[in-house]
Protein backbone atom coordinates (compact mmCIF):
# COMPACT_ATOMS: atom_id res chain seq x y z
CA UNK A 1 0.00 0.00 0.00
CA UNK A 2 2.90 2.33 0.74
CA UNK A 3 4.14 1.96 -2.82
CA UNK A 4 0.70 2.89 -4.18
CA UNK A 5 0.68 6.05 -2.07
CA UNK A 6 4.19 6.93 -3.28
CA UNK A 7 3.06 6.50 -6.88
CA UNK A 8 -0.02 8.64 -6.24
CA UNK A 9 2.18 11.37 -4.76
CA UNK A 10 4.39 11.24 -7.85
CA UNK A 11 1.33 11.54 -10.10
CA UNK A 12 0.14 14.57 -8.14
CA UNK A 13 3.60 16.15 -8.25
CA UNK A 14 3.90 15.69 -12.01
CA UNK A 15 0.34 16.60 -13.02
CA UNK A 16 0.52 19.79 -15.08
CA UNK A 17 -3.19 20.53 -14.69
CA UNK A 18 -3.05 20.89 -10.87
CA UNK A 19 -2.16 24.37 -9.62
CA UNK A 20 0.54 24.70 -6.95
CA UNK A 21 -1.82 25.57 -4.09
CA UNK A 22 -4.00 22.54 -4.77
CA UNK A 23 -0.94 20.31 -5.25
CA UNK A 24 0.40 21.30 -1.82
CA UNK A 25 -2.97 20.58 -0.20
CA UNK A 26 -3.26 17.21 -1.95
CA UNK A 27 0.22 16.13 -0.90
CA UNK A 28 -0.41 17.28 2.68
CA UNK A 29 -3.65 15.30 2.78
CA UNK A 30 -1.92 12.27 1.31
CA UNK A 31 0.79 12.44 3.99
CA UNK A 32 -1.84 12.61 6.71
CA UNK A 33 -3.43 9.29 5.72
CA UNK A 34 -3.16 6.54 8.29
CA UNK A 35 -3.05 3.02 6.90
CA UNK A 36 -5.01 0.52 8.93
CA UNK A 37 -5.35 -3.11 8.01
CA UNK A 38 -7.08 -5.76 10.03
CA UNK A 39 -8.45 -9.25 9.86
CA UNK A 40 -10.59 -11.21 12.27
CA UNK A 41 -8.67 -13.13 14.92
CA UNK A 42 -9.96 -16.40 13.52
CA UNK A 43 -9.31 -15.38 9.92
CA UNK A 44 -6.56 -17.95 9.51
CA UNK A 45 -8.06 -20.69 11.65
CA UNK A 46 -8.28 -23.76 9.42
CA UNK A 47 -11.45 -25.11 11.08
CA UNK A 48 -13.23 -21.76 10.74
CA UNK A 49 -12.21 -21.46 7.09
CA UNK A 50 -13.33 -25.02 6.31
CA UNK A 51 -16.72 -24.37 7.92
CA UNK A 52 -17.11 -21.09 6.04
CA UNK A 53 -16.33 -22.61 2.64
CA UNK A 54 -17.86 -26.03 3.29
CA UNK A 55 -20.90 -25.46 1.04
CA UNK A 56 -18.82 -24.40 -1.95
CA UNK A 57 -18.24 -27.18 -4.44
CA UNK A 58 -15.48 -27.04 -7.03
CA UNK A 59 -15.52 -28.93 -10.29
CA UNK A 60 -12.44 -28.66 -12.50
CA UNK A 61 -14.68 -29.09 -15.57
CA UNK A 62 -16.95 -26.15 -14.71
CA UNK A 63 -16.10 -22.49 -14.55
Image: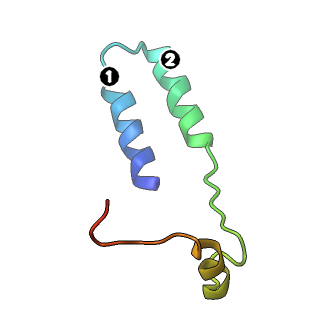
**Dot 1 corresponds to which residue?**
15
Sort mark 1 into few (<14), some (14-19) or many (20+) by Cα contacts within 10 Å: few
Q: Tell me which residue sits at (40%, 38%) in the image.
A: 8
In the rendered image, which quarter contains the C terminus? bottom left
Q: Residues within 10 Å of mark 2 (few under 14, many from 20)?
A: few
Residue occupying image coordinates x 46% and y 22%: 23
Residue 58 location, quadrant: bottom left
Left or right, 34 with reference to 17: right
Question: Relative to residue 15, is residue 27 depicted above or below?
Answer: below
The foreground one among 13 and 8 is 8
The residue beneath circle 2 is 22
Label 2 SS: helix
On the image, the x and y values in percent for residue 54 come to: 59, 76
Q: Position of residue 5 (x, y in %)?
A: 45, 45
> Residue 42's x, y, as percent?
70, 78
Q: Is residue 12 left or right of residue 61?
A: right
Q: Secondary structure at mark 1?
A: loop
Name the residue at 27% across, 68% down: 61
Q: Position of residue 59 (x, y in %)?
A: 35, 72
Residue drawn at (31%, 63%), measured in percent from left and top? 62
In this view, 47 is above or below 7: below
Amino acid sequence: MTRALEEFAAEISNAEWIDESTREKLLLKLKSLVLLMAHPDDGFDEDVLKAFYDDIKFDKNQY
